[in-house]
Amino acid sequence: MCTFCVKHGEGKRWYLNAANYAADLESDLGRRRFMVGFVQGFEKSRKSIRAGLGALRVLPEPIKGWLTARAEAAQQAEHFGQPVPIEDCEKVLAIATQVTRLPCVCRGAMRPGSNAESCCLVMTVAPHDTVVPEVFAGYRGGPEAEGFEKLTREQALALLRRCEEAGLAHTAWTFQTPFIAAICNCDLPSGCLAMSTTLRGGVKVMWKGEDVARLDAGRCTGCGQCVPACPFGALRSAGKQEVRLDRQGCWGCGTCRAHCARGALALEPREAAPDVAGRW
């Protein structure tokens, strides 16, 4: 297993390692510059990614495979994400002592002018009061605008639950791996560039979560409320009173559970599920 898999994901809940939140952004100038460049250069990056994905589609193998592998390795080293169930989000919030709500950069770039809810959380264990204004300088009114609120753990968890009710997947993100800086809330219709690049473009920016959903057919009434709520399209209606789960297509976010009144959906560790173990 590669170093990335062992240290940062693929069977390891790297986002629950408190050491990954310990970087002092006030003095860590390299990481600080990375975050500033990431946000302020996002529109340029978006256009570059779009052009690159278009070029990949017409390239022959093995050139396409080689370039894709290089791009994914770069993501692993700098900025990658992974779905995180609400239970683990709560544990993350217990580690992070500083939480600030931010506007979603993806949605702003993918859907200019949209008023999408601010649903990204930047989290550290040390104050980041001077970092956020620098990172978002000039961004739609900057950090003085609505959507740049400091949140308590209780407020942050309540926000995550509202996002889950809206059918969004919670995802943890590194900013220069293994430093974890944010929990975002994503789905394809809302304009998530990372999900689009991964699911439609075929280049991994995010990896599957450490869990996978399980459907209890005995509890399921086939109402279908969970189907549109799955951000990854792993659930579908099959007949009038039947719902089917594609466990291979499940990313383990657990969002579906918030939409099942019967408790027919649950999560189990991916590595302990023989049919999907090791399939990230």
Image (cartoon, rainbow, N blue to C red):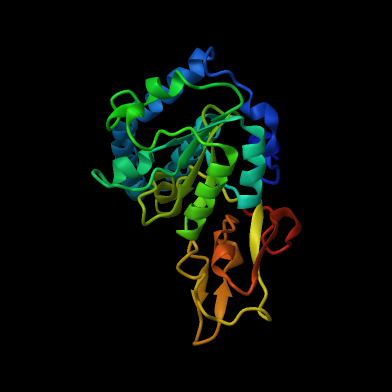
Residue 50 in view, yes or no: no
Which residue is located at x 28 percent, y 38 percent?
47
> Residue 195 at what x, y percent from top left?
44, 49
Residue placed most toward the observer, 245 or 169? 169
> Residue 60 at what x, y percent from top left?
38, 48
What is the tally of numbered marks visible in this picture? 0
> Residue 5 at what x, y percent from top left?
66, 39
Residue placed most toward the observer, 256 or 268? 256
Residue placed most toward the observer, 51 or 81? 81
Q: Quadrant of the N terminus?
A: top right
Task: From the viewer's perspective, tell me whether residue 104 is left or right of residue 221.
Answer: left
Against 247, residue 75 (above or below) is above
Give the image quarter of residue 193.
top left
Against 88, residue 35 (above or below) is above
Task: From the viewer's perspective, tell me whether residue 236 is left or right of residue 191.
Answer: right
Which residue is located at x 62 percent, y 28 percent?
21
Residue at the far bottom: name it: 240
